[in-house]
Amino acid sequence: MAYFRLFFILVTFSSYLTSAIARLNSSLHLLPGKEWSLTTRGLSSSVNLVPGETVWTNDIESLPETVHFTDVTMARFILLQEIKLHGDHSGFAFGLCFYCTSSTEESCYLTVMFVDILDGVILKGHHQVVWTANRDRPVGAKAVLKFSHKRNLEIYDAQNNWTWSSKTAGALVSSMRIKENGNLVLLNVSGGRVWQSFHHLTDTLLDGQVLKGGQHLVSRIHSKNMSSGLFSLNIDSLALSAYAKADDKPTRYLFVRPNNSKIDGHRLNFVEFRKANLTFHYQKNQSFSSSSLIFNSSRVQILRLDIDGGLRIHGWNPGKSWRVIHVFTLKGEDECQFPLKCGRYGVCRGEKCKCPVSIDGVRHFKPLDRQHPNYGCHQTHYTPSQGTFDKYRVVNFGNLSYFSYYDVSRAVPGLEYEDSCVDKCERNTSCKAAFFMFDTHASKGYCFLTADVLSLMETPSTVQYYSSLHMKIGIHSDTNVTGPSPSPQSSTSQSYSFGLVLSSIFSCLLALLLVAIVCLLVFQKKKIDDWNDHGLLKQVSSKVAIKSFSYLELYVATKKFSEKLGQGGFGTVFKGVFKDGGVVAVKRLETKQGTKEFLREVETVGAIHHINLVRLIGFCANRKHRMLVYEYMSKGSLDKWIFCGNTGTPLDWNTRKKIVMDIAKGLTYLHEECRYKIAHLDVKPHNILLDDNFNAKLSDFGLSKLIKRDESQVVTGARGTLGYLAPEWEHSRITVKADVYSFGILLLEIITGRKILDFLRPHSSVHLLSLLQKKALENQLKDLVECQSEDMQNHVEEAIDMMRLGMWCSDSDYTRRPSMSTVVKVLEGETHAAGTQQQLDEIAPSQ
């Protein structure tokens, strides 16, 4: 029996040994020379640092502990912290090393790297870079990592150019260590941490690492290019949000938050990654946390913002490759929402990639690599030798959508129809594609223009919108067409040719004379127009107390239009400072309006004065430029302050109430106290500006319409912003009650802290007004106060009354809406006026 047991033990040990040797051979058989046998015995997890003397050079002489990996990358190790598993056989390690992404050593980075270990030998597969020091400034062979006399850890390239520093001068750093969790730390003489890599994020979080407010994870460009990529992950006030830097504008495409109603209204302080779970720490008087529970059986986990924009948790187990444990997506979505899931111009459907096909069936694109369809696509007829295209035509690719749909604030203002959206792209030389998203039952929608086309998506049949994509397709001009050499001609033909030459010369001279005459006439007309414009300028300046500025004055005041304050559908606003210190806002208009019509509009706006209207100081009008000069409002537009997802301190109840009153008084003046009734027609948070004391003023009268006192309504084309448009716009007959509707929507946004249209919410909660009507029937209006601060809770009854007023103002029947003067009376507490209480109770009963 004893012999049998001994035999069984020997067989088991032999089987295990054979398996281990096979695994070692499969992991190392491609390594050249002695580098396959690198062991962990000669590497330490810590080192004492001597100022001016501790130096490592990126070469085989200084760092002989080198590993060549199967993906043709290489690492030269400085420190290594080994963690053993299953006795003394398998394990893993975190090492500090120079990591070179090619055999030529042209691009090398100082990194912290995860490596797989078997029997004390570093294996050539399964490595992962988890932190990079000089990610945007790679170095080459012979680069140096040294501990300077000032006690900074610094990187210099082979030409002795500074590349990176720990910035620890004066901190008495004496040693460096890599911890078991992968954290690289610099310690002082007493062992205290002076600096640590966990506080300097790249694209990865390790177990126990924290992402705080103000910090970002930034994706890399490629698995072998550690430079900062297109995507970033950071904390906003309520959630963990991912943004794509497309067309130099950060566009949110993903947000992650626990499915826990208790966190509503609480500010997110930091997120902790531990054991493959994210723990969200919120703050309201006292801290509490809520975790996203993810099943996990792996030994090592990392959270990474990947190169396609995906936020994933990756896990590793001994003897196995890294695998994806969890992918964070929006509810009901798949990985197609990630902006580079299928590369540039690739179409994603069911997480599979293909190239786009136009609606007429033509294949204008083909894969960059047929073996890897996720690498993206390029135009079929494009070849690098031909260079860039010099002509384009716009092609319809049908119902394809884009990641930016998840952030409708990135839509181009003022382009609410598909035709105008496509036309805008066609006229813009930098635009490559026009995406248009609209509801299935609406003719209007959102326009998205892009100069850098990332991955496309087939619009799922489950969504409540239809989408269209129009892209510019390049065409090469055929400029090298040559014909055969002419054959010899007879003397008669030569004589005919000579006569033809004389005739051509005479025709050219006549054409030149005609051109000179036309130029003279144009010049004379320009002088006459300039005289007329000058007369109109003097006439307007004499009628209203505003100043006429020259273009040069505003060009200098705005420092060449460098400090941009905002942009709307009709122009861009810049900050300007005059020589006397006066600060103004200069709006440079994009309009085809003639000088006469523009000055008539200036005359109208300049003649109205009210404390709750932004004051027009002056204007600039010449043949090329149209600019308006307004008083400067230091707090910016209202949309930056009222929505709970925005950064900054939420407005308290009294400030919100005061802002509502200011807007109501401004509209009352326009509707009832001017010579003409003035309908603003674009009342929305972006057009309400705030001064230092949060006094609110209406701005941007570019869409306003004058209505005579004896007229009840006026016929005009659709104008305004989706979500704030009154239903009667459908018939193009509007009154000042259209402003009352927009005011009602704005009032609801101010009180609830929610946007009227928010496509990031579940479908049932996208439209705020519909949700309010439902909650009113259920006597649950208080549930819609998004900013659950203590101050708001103390005024919840007043907030509900304000919501009822907002619902009255936004009644679908304009004849049932109150006038703005009635609204002011209600806000002042005169609810007995003109049956007001009865109207409010009909809209939503008291709660």
Image (tube, helix red, strand yellow):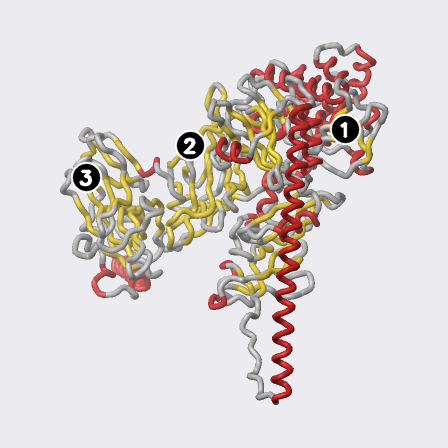
Residue 233 lies left or right of residue 595; in this view the side is left
Give the percent coordinates (x, y) of residue 639: 59, 29
Query: Which residue is label 1 attached to?
Result: 706
Q: Distance between the residues labelled 3 and 1?
A: 72 Å
Query: Which residue is label 3 attached to?
Result: 148
Report helix, strand or loop for mark 3. Answer: loop
Q: As displayed, is residue 114 above or below residue 737? A: below
Report helix, strand or loop for mark 1. Answer: strand
Q: As displayed, is residue 701 above or below residue 673? A: below
Q: The C terminus lies in which quarter of the figure?
A: top right
**Residue at x-position 28% and y-position 40%:** 184
Query: Which residue is label 2 attached to?
Result: 212
Which three-letter amino acid code belongs to the residue tagged 2?
Lys
Q: Distance between the residues labelled 2 and 1?
A: 52 Å
Which three-letter amino acid code belongs to the residue tagged 3?
Ser
Please name whichever residue, 30 or 512, is drawn nearer the observer in this view of the structure: 512
Closer to the chain start, of discs 2 and 1, is 2
Please name whichever residue, 74 or 520, is drawn nearer the observer in this view of the structure: 520
Q: How crowded is mark 3: few (under 14 residues within 10 Å), some or many (20 or more)?
A: some
Tag 2 near tag 1, CB within 8 Å: no
Closer to the chain start, of discs 3 and 2, is 3
Which three-letter amino acid code belongs to the residue tagged 1?
Leu
Q: Can residue 530 be seen in this view?
A: yes
Q: Distance between the residues labelled 3 and 2?
A: 30 Å
